[in-house]
Amino acid sequence: MKPFLVAMLLSALVGGSQANDCGTPPDVENANYTVSGYTVGNWTYYTCDNGHILYGRNRIPCTKNGWNKPSLFCQKIECDHPLPISNGRVTVGEEWTYGAEAIYSCAKGYTLTGQETIYCTDTGTWSHPPPNCTANNCGTPPDMENATYTVSDDTIGKWAFYSCDKGKIHPDPAPHSGRLVAQ
């Protein structure tokens, strides 16, 4: 063989083996990868971080020109807006994405039943259903001398109606019936 031809053949072999090494695969934000190998014909496989969902192809090949450009992205998982509750409120941040929290509280006179804080999970749902706000029980209205009462309900915001007993005069010159608000 002629020396020139041997040199060309060696150069092609050495250069070809270097060109077949794709090196480190490209990074994708919010993703990790595994590599089957770093030479032509091998693949890099991407998986999204917890709380993210993959859009596009999850793999790229190593070609004679290096790693193909990834055609994928990992988007943070979103939950629907947390549900409102009666006689209370929900406080949330600007986003309702994976890891976000919704904090519930009740209006004065109500007690929270259920989880006060819920979290957006990696499945795109809230960790718990919204809690309830239950009206506090006010108990029995106070007795008044020479009067009777009727109660619509014994929870906050309801009324107890008092009436003077027949033939009894109320010490206050105001009308002889009234109401007391449960608070």
Image (cartoon, rainbow, N blue to C red):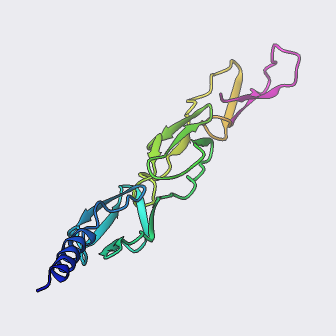
Q: In this orientation, which residue lies closer to the viewer: 131 or 145?
A: 131
Q: Is residue 158 left or right of residue 66?
A: right
Q: In this orientation, which residue lies closer to the viewer: 129 or 109?
A: 129
Looking at this view, name the residue that lies furthest to the top.
171
Residue at the image position 18 percent from the left and 76 percent from the top? 7
Q: Which of the image's four quarters has the N terminus?
A: bottom left
Residue at the image position 57 percent from the left and 49 percent from the top? 95
Q: Is residue 136 left or right of residue 18?
A: right
Q: Is residue 171 left or right of residue 181?
A: right
Residue at the image position 33 percent from the left and 65 percent from the top? 46
Q: In this orientation, which residue lies closer to the viewer: 183 or 122?
A: 122
Tell me if residue 62 is in the magenta stretch: no
Q: Which of the image's four quarters has the C terminus?
A: top right
Quarter occupied by residue 136: top right
Q: Is residue 106 left or right of residue 69?
A: right
Quarter occupied by residue 69: bottom left
Looking at this view, name the residue that lies furthest to the bottom.
1
- Count the labels in the image: 0
Q: In this orientation, which residue lies closer to the viewer: 167 or 135?
A: 135
Image vertical order of residue 138 relative to residue 131, above or below: above
Position of residue 102 measured from the top left corner of the image (x, y, whole percent)? 52, 44
Residue at the image position 25 percent from the left and 76 percent from the top? 40
Position of residue 128 measured from the top left corner of the image (x, y, whole percent)? 43, 51
Position of residue 79 measured from the top left corner of the image (x, y, whole percent)? 51, 57
Looking at this view, name the residue that lies furthest to the left.
1
Position of residue 87 measured from the top left corner of the image (x, y, whole percent)? 63, 42
Image vertical order of residue 85 relative to residue 43, above or below: above
Tell me if residue 179 is in the magenta stretch: yes
Which portion, as a residue range, is magenta?
159-183
Image vertical order of residue 63 relative to residue 92, above or below: below
